[in-house]
């Protein structure tokens, strides 16, 4: 081997999504080297970051990390009327909380105002921009529609010298707000409305949170966007999908200027059901006191999720499972809750807390005696060890764990039925003491001294186990039971004359004072996360928790209670089934037969969906399967050649699907349909009598992973 042999090139990160595929190709082509990649996270400081921003944030910082590059944090502070240093500080804190650190100092669009102004004069000198005196309403009215061209401004053809003079006088503060704007001179008949002479600068006599009163004209976002990326040397400008239609404008602005040209790549935004992501609407919830601030644990803001008890690692796990795609969709918030629940189940110590206390007296236990029982801190983690909990004659149990007259299959405490006290003894109810109004004041029980640890020596079977807290050592606490902020799955889907706030969940917060907790819970720190056994996962409030007055927020339930609620709602809203005409075979209940899905189209839940491997697939050929009018046989390229049989022939002709990039499930066992092997399954959505294949737009290679 020669001493001058070329060293091996460093291995590139795995192309786990289409963005990384593009960057890998840029590096392989020699356009960039590993370590050259520059990204940026550019929030506007006009509100707090929410879970949707977390997707963009993790993409920007994650790409830079994976490619040994750098990610800038830039505040797009081009609109002084809506920006505040409070938001700047909150954004920085949220980025750090998610585990990222930006390159160098925080950047601001306002740092580049002078340079942007210089480039604007350059555009005027090239005849590519002009000063317009039309009002904002006139500009809007003459812009045209998707089917009609716009009308040129009467000031569109001013001489360059006159435009320069007016623009400089705008800069000097000579004109009032709205008197004049600087517009790009492109094409008022362009099919893309964004290219119909967009405004570049407007007059706004408003003090800026950083530059003060230095400027009275401010750049519009579309003019500033590309220049900010260019000035910072960004190699890949990663944006959400709504900026795709603006990309031709960004390219047009940069093309005539002597500047670096970044590459813009768009991805789909994160949308969650039962959630509002609009900062404008979230601000309204705060200002109109529907919530208690931006960090209210019901809010989808990162600081709200943090206060509720969400962890950065759970959010990262959720975003990884949600994936990076080029098509818009709605992600089930149950997936986010599931990721958190999975983590907390492994990491959270278990404690006991009684939310609705009921006094329980063990009549045959020695008065004044307290013994300390051993309890396991976390059955999922042996290293978490054990703790001592006090046990005595008087305890608190939850009111829901006792019934004087029990319903069927009630295995908790009731007269004539034994129950196990968690980590304690077997007890049996012998007497109920009531208040004057007939409500239960105390429950008197006897205990089995030989059943310590909950296991009776005679081996008798005890079906129920309940939690409890010893009365003399119990600490009063406030528990805040948080739930989803909206009761409707699509809260912004309202009829004319109605408001999205009408869909707020009235049970999104229940405050329970006077709860009883075991003494160890008074030794926690704010933001410590625990499981209250049989109740849910809770977090010591970030601000209000004090050892002398503990406050806990419910983070998430032990199970997805909303799935049960939705199932019951569907049952309640379902049309009544017709009376059976004859017995139904196989022991099935009589009634209307469920609608059948087409062959090879499965209806699945969120837990099953998370286990599927979804890939993009280019349809190379399609033909009907003989002897059936329901099936099509497709030849696809999903990174490898495969054959798929799908029951879509009643919805699609072969010519309809050839050449399309669709989404397929790639990790299923081969199946045979009508004698033809199928090596995967298509992803589709069915509503009523319609079936739609899930397609992918944009330049995405076959075989790309889909979240």
Image (cartoon, rainbow, N blue to C red):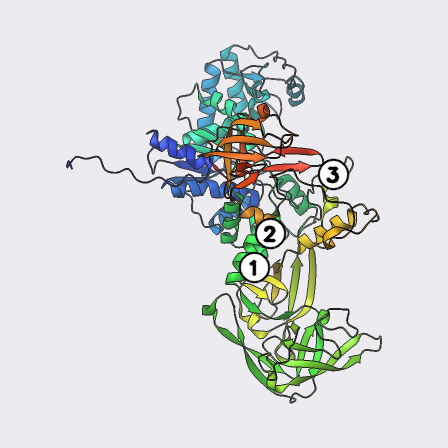
Give the labeled residue for mark 2: 295
In contact (CB < 8 Å): disc 1 and disc 2: yes
**N-term mark: 2 or 3:** 2
- Res 7 → quadrant: top left
In the rendered structure, are the residues bearing label 1 and label 3 in contact, judged by CB atoms less than 8 Å apart? no
SS type, badge 3: loop
What residue sits right under mark 1 in the picture?
542
Specify whether 66 is left or right of 390.
Answer: left
**Snapshot quadrant of residue 254:** top left
Q: Is residue 543 visible?
A: yes
Asked which secondary structure carries label 2, the reply is loop
Quick one: 278 or 401, which is closer to the camera?
401
User: Dot 3, how many residues are within 10 Å of its Cα: few (below 14), some (14-19), or many (20+)?
Assistant: few
Q: In this view, does 212 lie above or below 376?
A: above
Q: Residues within 10 Å of mark 1 (few under 14, many from 20)?
A: some
- First along the sequence among labels 1 and 3: 3
User: Residue 494: which numbered mark, if any?
Assistant: 3
Is disc 2 surrounded by few (<14), some (14 to 19) or many (20+) residues within 10 Å? Answer: some
């Amino acid at each position: 081997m020669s001493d001058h042999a070329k060293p091996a090139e460093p291995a590139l990160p795995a192309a786990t999504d289409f963005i990384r595929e593009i960057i890998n190709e840029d590096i392989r082509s020699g356009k960039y080297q590993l370590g050259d990649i520059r990204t940026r996270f550019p929030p506007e400081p006009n509100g707090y970051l929410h879970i949707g921003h977390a997707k963009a944030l993790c993409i920007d910082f994650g790409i830079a990390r994976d490619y040994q590059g750098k990610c800038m944090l830039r505040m797009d502070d081009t609109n002084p009327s809506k920006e505040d240093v409070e938001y700047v500080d909150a954004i920085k804190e949220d980025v750090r909380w998610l585990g990222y650190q930006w390159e160098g100092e925080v950047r601001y669009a306002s740092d580049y105002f002078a340079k942007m102004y210089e480039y604007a004069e350059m555009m005027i000198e090239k005849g590519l921009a002009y000063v317009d005196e039309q009002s904002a309403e006139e500009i809007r009215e003459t812009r045209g529609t998707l089917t009609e061209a716009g009308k040129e401004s009467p000031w569109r053809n001013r001489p360059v010298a006159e435009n320069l003079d007016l623009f400089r006088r705008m800069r000097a503060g000579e004109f009032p707000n709205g008197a004049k704007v600087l517009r790009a001179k492109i094409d008022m008949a362009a099919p893309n409305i964004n290219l119909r002479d967009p405004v570049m600068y407007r007059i706004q006599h408003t003090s800026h949170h950083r530059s003060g009163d230095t400027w009275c004209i401010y750049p519009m976002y579309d003019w500033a966007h590309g220049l900010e990326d260019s000035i910072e040397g960004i190699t890949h400008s990663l944006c959400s999908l709504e900026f795709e239609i603006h990309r031709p404008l960004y390219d047009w602005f940069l093309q005539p200027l002597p500047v670096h040209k970044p590459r813009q790549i768009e991805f789909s935004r994160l949308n969650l059901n039962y959630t509002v992501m609009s900062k404008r609407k979230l601000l309204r919830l705060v200002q109109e006191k529907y919530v208690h601030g931006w960090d209210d644990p019901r809010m989808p803001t990162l600081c709200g999720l943090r206060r509720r008890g969400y962890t950065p690692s759970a959010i990262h796990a959720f975003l990884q499972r949600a994936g990076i795609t080029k098509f818009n969709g709605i992600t089930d918030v149950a997936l986010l809750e599931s990721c958190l629940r999975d983590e907390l189940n492994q990491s959270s110590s278990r404690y006991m807390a009684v939310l609705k206390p009921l006094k329980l007296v063990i009549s045959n236990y020695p008065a004044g005696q307290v013994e300390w029982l051993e309890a396991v801190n976390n059955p999922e983690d042996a290293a978490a060890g054990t703790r001592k909990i006090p046990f005595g004659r008087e305890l608190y149990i939850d009111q829901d764990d006792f019934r004087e007259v029990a319903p069927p299959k009630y295995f908790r405490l009731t007269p004539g039925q034994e129950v196990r006290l968690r980590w304690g003894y077997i007890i049996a109810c012998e007497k109920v003491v009531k208040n004057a109004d007939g409500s239960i004041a105390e429950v008197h029980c006897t205990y089995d001294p030989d059943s310590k640890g909950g296991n009776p020596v005679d081996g008798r079977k005890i079906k129920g186990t309940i939690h409890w807290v010893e009365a003399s050592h119990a600490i009063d606490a406030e528990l805040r039971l948080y739930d989803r902020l909206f009761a409707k799955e699509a809260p912004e889907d309202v009829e004319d004359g109605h408001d999205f706030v009408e869909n707020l969940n009235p049970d999104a917060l229940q405050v329970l004072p006077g709860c009883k907790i075991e003494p160890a819970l008074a030794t926690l720190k704010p933001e410590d996360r625990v499981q209250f056994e049989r109740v849910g996962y809770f977090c010591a409030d970030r601000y209000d928790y004090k050892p002398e007055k503990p406050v806990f927020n419910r983070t998430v339930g032990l199970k997805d209670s909303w799935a049960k609620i939705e199932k019951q709602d569907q049952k309640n809203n379902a049309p009544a089934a017709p009376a059976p005409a004859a017995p139904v075979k196989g022991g099935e209940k009589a009634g209307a037969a469920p609608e059948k899905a087409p062959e090879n189209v499965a209806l699945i839940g969120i837990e099953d969906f998370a286990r599927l491997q979804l890939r993009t697939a280019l349809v190379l050929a399609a033909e009907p399967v003989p002897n059936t009018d329901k099936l099509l046989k497709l030849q696809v390229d999903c990174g490898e050649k495969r054959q798929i049989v799908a029951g879509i022939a009643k919805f699609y002709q072969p010519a309809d699907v050839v050449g399309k990039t669709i989404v397929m499930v790639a990790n299923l066992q081969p199946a045979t349909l009508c004698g033809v092997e199928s090596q995967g399954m298509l992803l589709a959505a069915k509503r009523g009598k319609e079936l739609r294949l899930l397609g992918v737009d944009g330049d995405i290679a076959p075989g790309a992973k889909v979240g």
